[in-house]
Image: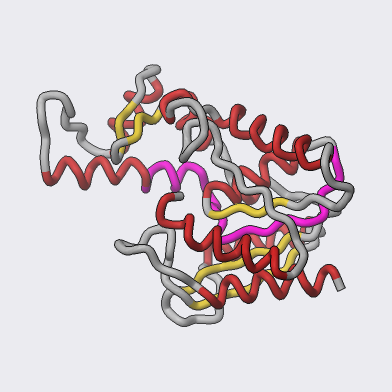
């Protein structure tokens, strides 16, 4: 989330100028929230969303929607499957499709670090399979300065967007195209096709910009902000 905070703030301000309120939260163990990342669990994060929803319901009498980026988008979908209330809509920014693939990419950060430095306190592991085996044995694993718990890793591993179909709620999926293409990537396109076969109310849009959540320096994508704001404005009109 560190590289994405500027974009989240830009979008929240853009929503506010159109009269939409935004409650932006740091999940347990992340950002300025309480707890340590090693103690974070997927179910705790879902409880955080439940607490945020309840807080809003006790203070406003307007429809509530969800907005998530990357793994947060997958969390939003998973939460929406379980939540006991009508959601107005769901906005997904470059949603993670496969929790398993996402976790593999995260674990590779440790491999990249091992190529640069290996110490006695950071034992070398020969690939992501070895890391997964360590996690399955109930061990935590330090990756990129974060201590990943085996419980959180297991929960993420089991998630797949294809299985998280949400009925009766408009979903707006924004795909980031770094190549300037106006087409979704093949993996995302398969999920979109599967959702539409199930009857999901889905709108997809491709926006050309750098992957701001992963760039070396903090970057912005004004076109994504304007496109997302326009979609919400169209829905409200």
Mark count: 0
Quarter of the picture containing the C terminus is: bottom right
Q: Quadrant of residue 21?
A: bottom right
Instruction: Specify whether residue 100 is painted magenta.
Output: yes
Q: Quadrant of residue 225?
A: bottom right
Front position in the image: 7 or 78: 7
Vertical position of residue 39 compared to residue 111: above or below: above
Report the side of 30 relative to 91 (left or right): left
Range covered by the magenta-colored residues? 85-105
Residue positioned most to the top: 138
Instruction: Specify whether residue 59 is painted magenta.
Output: no
Q: Position of residue 133 (x, y in %)?
A: 34, 26
Q: Can you see residue 175? A: yes
Q: Quadrant of residue 57?
A: top right
Q: Position of residue 206 (x, y in %)?
A: 58, 74
Q: Position of residue 184 (x, y in %)?
A: 56, 71
Q: Residue at x 70, y 38 (%)?
A: 52
Identify the image's colour scheme: rainbow, by chain, secondary structure or one colour. secondary structure
Q: Can you see residue 157? A: no
Q: Residue at x 51, y 69 (%)?
A: 176
Front position in the image: 183 or 74: 74
Q: Residue at x 56, y 68 (%)?
A: 175
Report the side of 142 relative to 97 (left or right): left
Q: Position of residue 123 (x, y in %)?
A: 17, 27
Front position in the image: 56 or 114: 56
Q: Residue at x 18, y 28 (%)?
A: 122
């Amino acid at each position: 989330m560190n590289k994405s905070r500027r974009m989240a703030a830009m979008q929240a301000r853009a929503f506010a100028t159109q009269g939409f309120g935004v409650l932006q939260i740091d999940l347990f163990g992340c950002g300025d929230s309480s707890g340590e990342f090693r103690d974070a669990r997927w179910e705790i994060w879902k409880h955080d969303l439940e607490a945020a929803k309840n807080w809003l319901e006790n203070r406003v009498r307007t429809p509530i929607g969800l907005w998530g980026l990357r793994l947060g988008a997958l969390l939003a979908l998973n939460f929406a499957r379980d939540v006991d209330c009508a959601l107005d809509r769901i906005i997904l920014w470059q949603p993670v499709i496969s929790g398993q693939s996402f976790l593999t990419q995260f674990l590779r950060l440790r491999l990249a670090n091992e190529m640069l430095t290996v110490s006695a306190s950071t034992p070398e592991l020969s690939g992501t399979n070895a890391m997964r085996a360590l996690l399955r044995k109930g061990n935590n694993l330090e990756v990129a300065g974060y201590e990943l718990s085996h419980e959180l890793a297991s929960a993420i591993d089991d998630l797949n967007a294809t299985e998280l179909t949400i009925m009766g709620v408009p979903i707006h999926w924004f795909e980031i195209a770094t190549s300037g293409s106006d087409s979704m990537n093949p993996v995302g396109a398969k999920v979109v096709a599967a959702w539409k076969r199930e009857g999901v109310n889905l709108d997809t849009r491709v926006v050309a910009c750098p992957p701001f959540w992963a760039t070396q320096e903090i970057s912005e994508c004004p076109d994504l902000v304007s496109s997302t704001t326009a979609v919400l404005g169209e829905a409200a009109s």
